[in-house]
Image: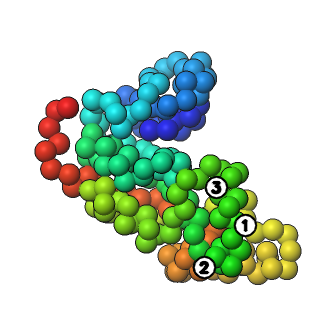
Amino acid sequence: IGCGVGGVCRRLRDVWPSIEGWDIALAAIREAQQNDPCSTYVHGAYDQAEQRTSVALLLDVVEHVDNDVRFLRAVAERCDDLILRVPLDWSLLDQIRPHRIEQARSQYGHVHIYSRHTLQKSLREAGLTVLRVAYDRVPPGAPATSWGHLSGAARRLGGATVPSVTAWLLGGFSVFVHARSSIKNQGDL
């Protein structure tokens, strides 16, 4: 869901031959269909479709959606498991440097600014149970300054030992989440 021009679908086709990409951007769907005619691409909003699937991937999507809880609940009603990748744009350090949060909004179009806690709250409210979490360091890394080298080293060390605390303190991480729908009455739509 939110497949863009289909790069992830192309990579996953060998693992999941019957993969289907959805996006609300018609230009992205057209490019995906042109670049990857062997996969299926659908122009539309999956959260409003009548389709069911066992697994849905939402990679760097939920932070762009106006009503994240309603969107996640609608997706959870249509599938059993969700795999999400969500940037954790909120950190203690970014509270001191609010221009970073504003950059996530203006440059990347993030409507929601998440910490692990606020993301977990949204997932719970949407009827999802978190099964597994893994942290991912966000490129490009720290700037080439003394502070950048120091904070980069702290992120590497902390990311390897206590990633949740490091993400909360210093930022610069995304989180992969495997969540299961706990919404009852998931019959045919």
Q: Amino acid at mark 1?
A: His
For label 3, count other residues whose C-alpha is less than 10 Å away and answer few (under 14), some (14-19) or many (20+): some
Name the front one of labels 2 and 3: 3
Q: Amino acid at mark 3?
A: Arg
- The amino acid at mark 2 is Leu
Residue 105's label in the rendered image is 3
Provide the secondary structure element on which disc 3 rests: helix
Q: Which residue is mark 2?
A: 92
Residue 103 rendering spot, x and y as whole percentages: 70, 59
How packed mark 1 is, by other alpha carbons closer than 10 Å (few <14, some 14-19, many 20 or more), is few
User: In whole angstroms, how far apart are the C-alphas of marks 2 and 1?
Assistant: 13 Å
Q: Which residue corresponds to mark 1?
A: 99
2 vs 1, front mark: 1
> Who comes first in sequence, dot 3 or dot 1?
1
Task: Say whether residue 92 is visible.
Answer: yes
Quarter of the image for residue 21 reads top left
- State whether residue 155 appears in this view: no
Give coordinates of residue 3: x percent, y percent: 51, 36
Q: Residue at x 49, y 32 (%)?
A: 23
Q: CA distance from mark 2 to mark 3?
A: 17 Å
